[in-house]
Each structure stands twice: as C-alpha cells, then as structure tokens.
Amino acid sequence: MRLIAAGLSFRTAPLAVREAAAIPAARAATTLRYLVGHAGLLGAAVLSTCNRTDFYFVCPDNLSAEVTPRLARYLDPGGTRGLERHMVTLEDREAAEHMFRVASGLESMVIGEAQVLGQFKSAHRVATEAGTVDARLDYVMRRAISTAKRVRTETALGRGAASLSEVAVECARASCGDLEGKGVLLVGAGKMSRLAADRLHDQGARIMTTSRGESSRRLARAVGAEPVALGEIGEVADEVDVIIASTDSPVTVFAAAAVDALQRRRGQRPLCIVDMAVPRDVDSAAGEVPGVTLIDIDELGRRAGQRLDQRRETVPAAEEIIDHELDKTVTVIGQRDTAGPTIAALVDWAEKLRAQEVARSFDSGRPIDEATRERVEMLTRSMVRKLLHGPVTRLREAGDPATTLAIREAFRLDR
C-alpha cells in the first residue's frame, strides 16, 4: 500500500487554478466517498483552504501512478484549467512529511499560522465521519496533529504569528491611514471574519457584518457589530470604507457591476476591498472600478511574506521536531502491516514493566530469599503471559492493519 499526498497550493498554482480545485466544506464528504468508491482508493481525506487543496490517500501499489491523473480528471473534467500540470504528488515518507509540515504551519502563506492546525483536524474529522479513513491514513493524520501541537508548544514558530485575517486588517489600515471610526463591512461569518473582527475592534473600527442566514447576526452579537442584510448593502454604502470578504461561496458574491454601483453611491471615494476567499468572493474586474483598491489572497500572501524574516529563524527547530516524529511514524508504518513486530513490541513492553515492578518490590529493604524471588519471578511472568494471550492471539488471527494499530495505540507502543 502507498500513502500519497496530491494537491496544489499558492506555491504551485495561480489563484484561478486553485479556485477550480477548491472543495467547499459542504461537498467534502461526498467527494471523498466518490473517490474511495470509484477510484480504487483505500482511504481519502481532503484539506481545502484559501491557499491550498490537498488530498491525502492510501492506495494499492499498482494504482499509485494513476491517483493524480484520476484526481485531476475528477476536479477538472474537461481539462480546461490545466489542474494536473500544477499538481504535486508525494509518496510514502515524503507524503507524511508534507502532512506534518502542513499541519504545523510550515507550508502556509503566513508561516506558523494557527488556523491551519484546526483546518487539518477538521479534514481528519470530516473524512472519519464520511467513513473514508483507513487505519494507515488515520494514524498518519493523528501523528501529524500531535506533531503540530509539539511544534506550537516547544518552539517560537507560532508565537506572535499573524493570521491572514490580521494581515487583511493591516492592509485595510494601510489603505485608510487609520481605522479609528472607519466603517468596515465583514462579508462572511466564519472563523476568518471572527479573527478580523477582533483585530478591527482593537483598531477602533465600526464593524458591520453580512452573510446568508442567521450567521451574520450571531457574529454581530459576538463582536458588537451591526448586522446588514446581504441585499441591503447599498443602503449603508456611505458608511463603508473597507470590505473584507471571506465566505465559502462557490460563486462570486460581488460582481464588478455591483461594486461599481456601490462606488457611485459613495461618490467614488476610496474603497479598500480585501478578498480572502478561494474561490474569490469579488470579481477581479472590480479592481478597475474608480476609487477601488482590490487585494486578493495572493496579494495578501506577498504582503505577509515581507514580515516573516524573524519567524523563519524558528523554522529549523520546528523541522527538527518534525524529523524526529516522522522517523518514528515511518518506522511504525513499516511494522504495523504485519503482526510480528507488534507482538514483539508488546511482549517487550510488558516484560520491562514486569521487571521494573518486581525490582521495586525487592528494593523495599526487606531481605528476600532466593526461593521466594524465583517464585515471584515465575508468578509474574505467568500473569503477563496470560494477560497478553488475548491481544497476541487477536494479532495473529486478524491480519489486518486496523487491529495492529488499535493494539499499538492501546498499549502506547510507539511513544
């Protein structure tokens, strides 16, 4: 079996191509079930964010070369976007390393960003609930999550790390000069908007929110903002100086004509629009409307890159942790498909524990004669054999990776 990571990111594909590959949250489970059901895969998960779409697969050896072409045809049926040309495919150790780096924030536009770990956890959860995670993929994804937590707690990588939302607010402040008293309309009510709202509140901005459904009102209540119906934005045009958009809509939210109409109502005063969404919420042609400064996700990434020199100095420490955890993970992957190494590890763990407890009892200071010592040794060894009989028998009879992994996890054999 092969572990495969296949996808594209801001490093390998332009924004227009990334839009075509984006998988909305509402479609993720259906997509994964289709891929596992029709592409010969044993496991599948997808991580789709504003700057990457990654698929993580487990497949038979003979299908590994077909995974990326099949995935590209699924995402881009007519081949008009050229997805396959921009996709990168990694296998086995390199695939696991990529997953570890992504979860740890080393592959993000903003190095060390905290949001990607939550997104990676969500990808694992969605795939688990969809029933498309086999034992191998489940193990590697959980190891990536635990490694990312180590990176965040044991290095300075994430300390003071900006999110894209914070960079978006900085762009808005640079455009307006000062956000104190300025009207900022948040389009979308997800986590990115919430993070932006917190920073905007600190900057003294007047916050308005709009979104489909009740989510806009919930966000408005949470951050002390004014909710505005999506169809009534024109009514508050004069009060808006900045628009920050981050919805998960698969279609454009603001056409260029709508932005032009908004500007006419504002008398063409300067308007900063920051579009953090992929696919884009704002038609790129809106940047040509008089008075409009349009900043898309790639421009955000370029601006974020200018402030990362200090954080890059912390990357080697994070990579050292990843290399250490990766070595352990790859070793386990190599062992867990056969029962023998796991049985040996289990017996070795039990024997060490038994010997430690016996030694602790004998070291209590009371003299123990040799005959008693031998009886204790025989008794404890017999108890260990009987306690391990069930797990060892199950390992020998089952012959599947899921059972091996479950026992390794239950007895913490890889820690």
Image (cartoon, rainbow, N blue to C red):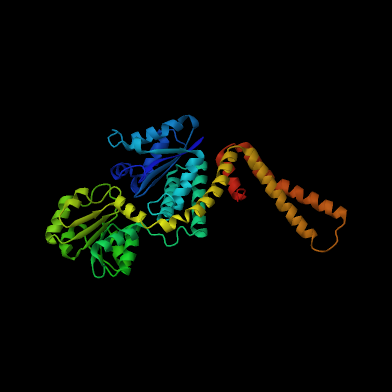
Q: Nearer the viewer, residue 26 or 12?
A: 12
Q: Does the rendering let one see residue 110?
A: yes
Horizontal and vertical percent for residue 114? Answer: 42, 57
**In this picture, residue 237 sits left or right of residue 87:** left
Q: Which of 9 and 383 is in front in this view?
A: 9
Q: Does the rendering let one see residue 113?
A: no
Q: Quadrant of residue 37?
A: top left
Horizontal and vertical percent for residue 65? Answer: 44, 31
Horizontal and vertical percent for residue 411? Answer: 62, 50
Up-down relation of residue 400 to residue 271 (above or below) = above
Horizontal and vertical percent for residue 26? Answer: 34, 47
Count of numbered labels shown in the rendering? 0
Taking the spot 40% from the left edge, 51% from the top edge, the residue there is 108
Up-down relation of residue 44 to residue 157 (above or below) = above
Q: Quadrant of residue 266?
A: bottom left
**In this picture, residue 331 sits left or right of residue 12:** right
